[in-house]
Amino acid sequence: MKNLKKLFLVAMAVLMLGITSCTAATTVTSTVTNTQTVTETKTVTVDPSVTVTDMTGRTITLDQPATRVVALTAADCEILYAIGAGDTLVGRGEYCDYPVDVMSVASVQSGYETNIEQILALKPQVLLMGTMAQTEDQVKQLEAAGVHVVVSDAQDIAGTYQAIEMIGKLMGKEDNAANLIKSMKATFDKVSAKDTGKSIYFEVSPLQWGLWSAGKGTFMDEIANLCGLKNIFGDIDGWAAVSEEQVIERNPDYIVTITMYYGEGPTPEEEIISRAGWSNITAVKNNAILNLPNNELSRPGPRLADGALALYDFVNK
Amino acid sequence: MMDINALAKKNKFRFLDYAVFGVIMLIVFVLCVAIGSVRVSFFDTVKVIWSAIWNIPLPEELVNTSSIIVSVRLPRVICVALVGASLSICGGSMQGLLRNPLADGSTLGVSTGASLGAVISIAFGITLPNFPLSGTMVMAMLFAFLSILFIISLANKIDGSLSTNTIILIGVIYSMFATSIISLITVMASDKVKQITFWTMGSLQGSTYTNVVILSVVLLICGAVLLSLSEELNAFAIGEENARHIGVDVKKVRLIVLILVSVLIGVCVSIGGSIAFVGLVTPHIVRMIVGPNYKKLLPASIICGATFLMLADLIARIILNPAELPIGVVTSFVGAIVFVIIFYRTRKGK
């Protein structure tokens, strides 16, 4: 057991270097280039158990990679599909909606309404959940019923990598997870830019319902900074209702709205342009408004890279 | 004991009272236009408004300021004032009509009913062609009226009186019921969760001059009729039996008042979301100042309601700058405290 832990630590170290790895490999230390072959032999020769440390620091050990999983957060569902483990999903949180396949998986309540019975009825080995609105008691109840609870709690891009890596390991898909992280990193490298001197405003809720924007500590803010853009509400923590006067005063060069368009009335972009008093905002003058309605910039999952790329293309078109 | 003369004098229209109320309201109005999230000097504020009225071109550096003051802040402050005035006259009228000091759009479930109507229109995409917000507004009005009708007839069936706690109890229960249906719709129409959630939070942000016109017209018509009924409301306040005895067409007056109240609350809710406490608290505060005569109570409620809500909105706009606080948080917080203080003092004095 102790040996295994040691190996795990080494594997973690290798992963952190950004190199594809595998965990239970007996000879990881000897040579990195050998990992591929080791992976193949692993299944027959090595103890198949997996141990992961989840994002609240709890250690979870499974006899073998999980084959029945319930994931409560939309991001974790996306990660499972992205690493090719979508078929292990036997239940999903009610708000998980991507990719389309996930909609045919049994839905369970999540957040404040988390229903332990619903989850247990699906007989999962592992429950993936976030920290928001989940409680210690729920964890205890589930563990008592023999379900391994693994918590993912990514607050930034680095955290997202950690979640992908953790889930990859849990499912025995370390290689896919590593490749996914690698491709995300490549995308983020591509979009990275020095300070462009331009500013951006993220509109989370349109004026009609009261303006909401994303401040410090959100993925939108992080990705904007990565692209060399200054978030005009970077001085606010998290999500907040913001002052319309301030949007006009801070005069953003770009606007990103996440309002969904239902095919009637003006599109979200048109609606922003038509607002009284907004016509002098640079973004409105230049028609530099982008609509990203599919949570690309808010979920700690693989599509963060897509969102960043969309923003990059939009800014550099 | 007050002698007859003093009593008559107290009931008389006193110009000074209105002048004082009016001046306070104007000062608050100017304050609310001059102060905001973005700091603009008083001189510039006056200048951009003046230029906008007379269509005078502005120097380049004031164009943005003009957008902020003329297109954003001014219509919002006016809308807030009109909503405050409307909700207060509604609360005052209902308290008189039902002879119930706790009657108000929020306690009787009328606001929640209006919200339900609006949520249904959002969820099922009910709109009148060519009018983007009209579906929400009409549904809000309709549901406000149906709710009030339902609550009052049920209360009437149960104990034949509208002044008891029964009606408030039914109102509160109806409110919970309507809220549960709103939640149910929210769960079912999962693609519009965001819209509905944000809508129920309510916001006077993004008020336009169109909203100002709608609110003004509605308040002018409904308010005028309600004011003209203040004699009847006085009679109701003593008792329905009394009103009947002195020749008031009880059924007709009640129906008219209820329709007007529903229209006003429906329009307010569809423009600004449901704002608690204004309609309940303002008439009480006013009653403590001008007395229970509806001839004075209703006009004073209009002025004080506008003043109160403008101040609440000012706090909501600037306290967390550049973020904003929902106005309902301020009205409930301030309203509850003010109410308890005044209530305690007057009751203790007795």
Image (spheres, coloured by chain):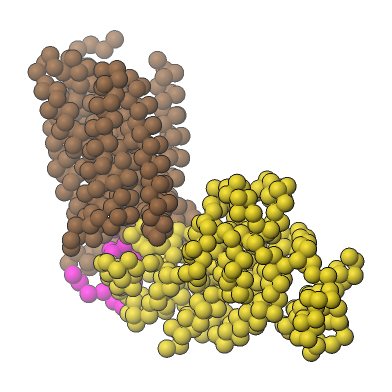
Residue sitting nearer the eye, B326 or B112: B112
Look at 68% across and 59% down and name the residue there: A126
Q: Identify whether A228 is placed above or below B19.
A: below
Viewer-proximal residue, B123 or A156? Answer: B123
Which residue is drawn at the image coordinates 80% and 88% (left, top)? Answer: A34
* Residue most extreme to the right: A2
x and y percentages locating residue A63 in the rendered image: 78, 63
Specify whether residue B66 is painted magenta.
Answer: yes
Query: Start and end of the magenta stretch?
Result: B55-74
> A27 and B175: which one is in front?
A27
Please report the residue visible at 43 percent of the width from the left and 83 percent of the height from the top.
A314
What's the residue at 27%, 69% (across, down)? A266
Q: Does the magenta portion include B224?
A: no
Chain ID for brown: B
Q: In the picture provided, is B94 more to the left or to the right than A57?
A: left
| In the rendered image, the vertical position of residue B230 relative to residue A293, given as above or below | above
For residue A280, say whether it is visible.
Answer: yes
From where the camera sits, is residue B79 visible? no
Quadrant housing residue B285: top left
Find residue B302 and report its image quarter: top left
Residue B345 position (above or below residue A140): above
Q: Quadrant of the C terminus of chain A?
A: bottom left
Q: Which colour is chain A painted?
A: yellow
Give how far across and how far down residue A247 sits, in percent: 41, 68
- Place of residue A152 in the rendered image (x, y in percent of width and height, measured from the top left): 65, 63
Left/right placement of residue A107 relative to residue A314 reads: right
- Using the image as rendered, state which of residue B43 and residue A55 is in the foreground: A55
Tally the numbered discs.
Answer: 0
Q: Position of residue A171 (x, y in %)?
A: 69, 69
Report the magenta stretch's main SS. Answer: helix
